[in-house]
Image (cartoon, coloured by chain):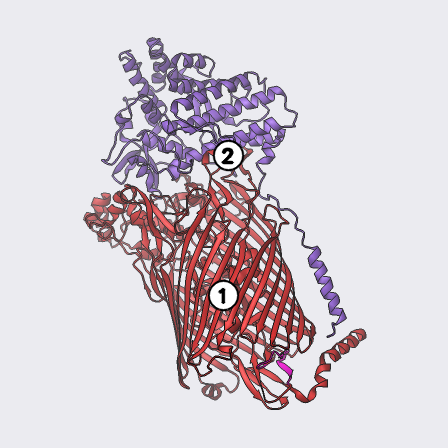
Amino acid sequence: MKHNLIKRSVFLIFITMPFVLLAQSVVKGTIEDASYGGPVAGANVIIKGTTVGAISDFDGNYEITVDSFPATLIFSSLGYGTKEVQVTSAGTINVSLAEAATGLDEIVVSGLATSIKRTNLANAVATVSATELAGTTPPKTLDGALAGKFTGAIVSANSGAPGGGMSIKFRGVTSINGNSQPLYIIDGVYLDNSSISSGGLNAVSQASGGGNASSQDNATNRIADINPDDIQTIEILKGASAAAIYGSRGAAGVVIITTKKGKSGKTKVNFSQGFGFNEAIRLQGQRDWTAALAESQYGEGALYTAAEAAGTLRDYEKEIFGEKGLISNTSISASGGSDKTTFFTGFSRNDEDGIVKNTGYKKSSFRLNVDHRFTENVKLALNTNYITSNADRGFFNNDNTGTTLGVALTATRPWDFLLPDANGNYPDHPNNSSNPLQTRDLMKNNERVNRFIVGGSLDINVYRNENSSLKLVSKAGIDTYTLAATVIFPKELQFQRPDQGGLNGVSAVSTTTNKNANYSTFLVHDWNLENDLSFNTQLGATNEQFSRNTVRVVATDLIASETNVDQGANQTVTQDRLEQEDFGFFVQESINYQDKLIGTIGLRGDKSTNNGDVNKLFYYPKASLAVNLNNFDFWNEDSFLSRLKLRAAYGEAGTFAVFGSLYTIYASTLIDSNVGIAVPLTRGNPNILPERQKELELGFDLGLIENRLSLEFTMYKKNVDDLLLLANTQPSSGFSTKWENAGELENKGIEIALNASIVQNDDFDWNAGLNWWKNKSEMVRMDVPAYNTGGFGTSLGTFRIEEGKSVTQIVGNNVDGDLVQLGNAEPDFQMSLSNNLNYKDFSLSFLWHWKKGGDNVNLTKLLSDFGGTSADYDDFTVDPNGQIKNGDYRINNGIFAGNATPFVEDASYLRLREIGLYYSVPSSTLNQWFGEAISNVKIGFSGNNLINIFDYNSYDPEVSNFGGNGLSTGVEVTPFPSSKRYMFHLSAQF
Amino acid sequence: MKILKQYSIIVLFVTALVVTSCELDGGESLNGASTSSISDDLSRGELTQALSGVLSDMRVGLATHTDVQSIFGREYYYFTSSDPRFEGDVVVGNLDNNTFYTTTPWGARYATIKDINLILEGLANTTADFSAEEIAATKGVLNTLKAHELLMLSDNQNDNGIRVDVADPENLGGFLNRSAALTAISEILATAATDLAAGGTELPFNLTSGYDGFDTPSDFLKFNKGLHARVEMYRGNSAAVLTLLDDSFLELSTTSINNGIYHTFSLSGADLSNPLFIAPNQEANVRVAHSSFVADAESGDNRLNKVLLRTTPRQASGLVGAYDVAIYGSNTDDVPVMRNEELILLYAEANITTSPSTAVSAINIIRSAAGLLPYVGATTPEALTNEILKQRRYSLFGEAHRWVDMRRFGRLSELPNDRATDNVPSAVPVPANEN
């Protein structure tokens, strides 16, 4: 202890010595947050026109030595606007920084351990603030909340099932069979975003029994676990030019999430409660049934008449999808702390019922973020998050047995009587193998997650003086969860009864344990030269470990009404493991000349146990340059053009091969009690390499009229070479597919973001943002023959990887039987418009999102045509000649004629993604009512997807039968319909 | 400009840790045995498992194979609410070369052949203590099964052809049309027979209960000969058929028509259930007999118990079926690979020209087993061929024979088409992914 004290005092002397010596010209003070008065730690203070600077400590205190007065000090910090203050003499200057309004002045995390001012950034990095993320209306899931909020992304829901299921792609498709979903990092922890199928569903649906290996049951992707309320900012690195330092994990983009931190001072407690409900966006409706139609379609005119007389004609679509699900969101958070230790803690509980009975999503999240300063120069941050979630997802999408609710509905007519009797006995469906009401009420498809995410970082200022500093940053993070999925099909179900060929009950338990661990260490050196050059050097090493183990037990022929998996005659056990370890290092050098020219070069090296040669390093370089023309002397400061930056960035990143793709692994099988080994569909490739993405991004940012109008224009070209293809092999080899590095694709695009502060008055202000973006992809080279992927074949429309064609083309046979391109999943462009209006104590925000173009393969209608139940069966809108009924056309002239044209549909939409209207009770009123006890009381209404305009002939053009990865998005087979949400909110601070 | 010592020590320590910890250990195939573990060196313990894999894989795609052929042969229709192509493409005869009804049977048979080729490779490289007899017996069994798989492929593909030499995935053999394929299969069976004959008295592995009575080299040889007889019949070599049948498990008796080789099924674990079983009177998924099956039957034919009158007919897209196919009574029933009933019919067919009376007596065994009176028609080759085709239609209903039989006698045009759009194709196209 004593020894320590001595050490510390020695240390303090070293630190304070320079200041003591030059005390007469020292300016010092505290930097505060303008909104609540807490300290702003780590803020930059720079003497304008020089590179002399200082950084505020954890209490917001700063000291800077000024050589000559008067001088201008520039204060800046992450998330805050920049402030310039004139100083004429040494002394104390306290400054308060306001949160960045336009986003121009904020600080952006650019390295693994460094940040940079947005104005000096050479990439178009998108930032989503807490307000933008969840301020208008609470998002269903974190990833869903990103839709339309920045350029360059396709954010699409796979289905409307509670608990999410999203696909996010930045700047087009980046991988066809490798990972194409971005990397999520929360406070330095690499998050797992797997979608893990539950056992037992496919045993019943047999969706993977036909030509398609996917079980098509749309599991939740695990990013849904993250609580949006905890988030301070999200930054999005869209491609290799920005994400090169993430190496082989960065090719699909990186989503960097920073959670809220505590601020020392009085402990503040925030409480918010939201109530609301959801309902289906659009139902398909019924065919215009009459007794005559029932007779001609089914010979059941008499049954129709009888049901009509008895008053038992029923709209089963409404019966199943017509529920209003209740939503309740409760959130309590507290923040505060002492000068050494600060904390943020939050607890939230979300409870949302689905639009189908017995579906819903419940989530509780507890977070504790603690920052502790051991000494002036040693800081520890610990972020912990525990999440428990519980999703009941029902039984949807494609099947081969007529058992999912969606497929069963396509065969259900209004006169079928499916309601249970008083004792809960359900009648058999007269026209289908399952009674959808019975299935809905008795089956269970539940996912429960218990998840811990813990991240820690240790910052040590090794050394610091006026011109240079050296910092050591060590980070460690663990994301670990257990996912227990339960699937139960009781033996009472129509399709489970042995006399119906059923399995006499199915109960399945799938348990997944997952652990991601990542460790990294960086050295960051800042060096400011006399000649106005400053250098930032960082080097570091990272290590990531991934471990996953899924055990699925499916029991059939169950005893009585027992559901334990040992309580059945037959058990099938499967296990799937993943173990991967990656190691990487990187170096990066940034050079800043007076904020005029900012250049960066860097190199990342990576290796992984997923590669053929585990210790071979793959290198990913990057280089970028930003030129702030407005900072040069020739710039006329009074120009209406207040800011002009030119930027160029190039970077490379990779995607490691999928785990296990090195090997050809026997599948295990059983026959007559003998265990057997059988060749798999896929032939491994011991020489597989990572994909390599090379992205060049060029753009300019300009600000007009004192930056009240700002424009960010970006164009990019990114090529992905050594493309990982699960290429078709000649099946006579015994294998259907083989892993190969066999092609190159290209994405080119344009992104334009326009932000305007239209009105700025004391009582009224109005900010608007307009985003426009488009991407065009092409398969520029293929070393293997063209092949179809992600669909149901050319007679129904399928994706096809073909040299010279768009990567996302949808092909099929046309009316003449020729294989042609029938569509393209890629939108022509996307556009979003956000508005934020504040009048006195009222605020109104809304976000429109327009996706123009992009096609889906819609097979829901075809299935209901086969059931004779399509609402538009008797219309004449599909036949180009208008002669044949839609239902007949799709069947006889569509599938039976080998013509896939009717199934490829335009999936454009325009939707009011978010709208919120809030009233803040004035503090004077609050003081009258409650004294000082309560502040910041806000009430409001909000909604999600309230207006949806689309021609697409089904529930929602945002849909994917095959989940989120790769190319198969936009194929629709009887999904869980998506919903809109209406919410009421109340929040207060104590 | 002073570096604080204790921190520099930390920095050095961390740097050292990072540099030294960067060697990665090799990954491994966690989720199953690598195929090279069999092909590089086959052990005694692995042989039974690898062989069980072959027997198990022989069942994969069996339903699609059987359904497609049975629809082509207008034996039954398969209506499924979730895949309309069974009542579309397959009945219309407008076949896609890149969808499941084309690719599943093709891929599944070649996967089984790959299983077999990996074991044959492993036998060549083995360091285990297999005797020469054991190796010969194993090769004999494997090549017989391989011939069976190739024959299923050739049945489907006809003159579109199949590949026979597929041991090296990087260097696949050429396509053989029907006659060349049958010649190649015949040669494989002959070699297998020689191996089986030299195979000693016991097989060094377990077969399934579906091979009861055929589980020694000499008994398995009887299956080899039966299968070879089928191939020679397809090639039109009646004399060879008769010789082969002599050494096969042919038994001219009404009680033993179901003797033979079977695929077995169960519900336990990773085993498969009988994919051809559907309970009666279903709606969503049904196999309904073609109306002509009942209409054309002689009265009293007990083989009509292979279908069951539905409570209500099932229709789909203008096709209708009043009878469910009810060949199998549960989802664990065995499915035949080859039965004595077929051998008796092959025997009859091979005798049509050389000994019509022998043919008639063989036909009468079948008729008697079916509860019918003896054959009284003409004994001209044409009349007997008609009769044998008819008996084959009822005896081998739903076992993937009808379409092949009608094709080899040039009679596909006689098969009924219920809708104007319908057509019976003569072959399945070569899958798109074969170049």
Is A88 in front, or is A866? A88
Residue B285: x %, y % from top left:
35, 40
Is A801 in front, or is A161? A801
Q: Which chain is red?
A: A
Location of residue A165 by image quarter: bottom left
Residue A56 magenta-highlighted: yes
Report the residue at 58% width, 26% height from top.
Answer: B205
Image label count: 2
Using the image, determine if residue A165 lies above or below residue A125: above
Mark 2 nearby-residue class (10 Å; few <14, some 14–19, many ≥20): some
**For mark 2, what is the residue?**
B169
The chain letter under disc 2 is B
Report the residue at 60% width, 74% height from top.
Answer: A533
Q: Look at the image and give the colour of chain B.
A: purple
Residue type, label 2: Pro
Q: Is residue A460 left or right of residue A734?
A: right
**For mark 1, what is the residue?**
A648
Residue A79: x %, y % from top left:
53, 75
Residue type, label 1: Ala
Residue B119 magenta-highlighted: no
To the question of a shared chain for discs 2 and 1, the answer is no
Residue A239: x %, y % from top left:
49, 60
Callout 2: SS: loop
Callout 1: SS: strand
Q: Nearer the viewer, mark 2 or mark 1?
A: 1
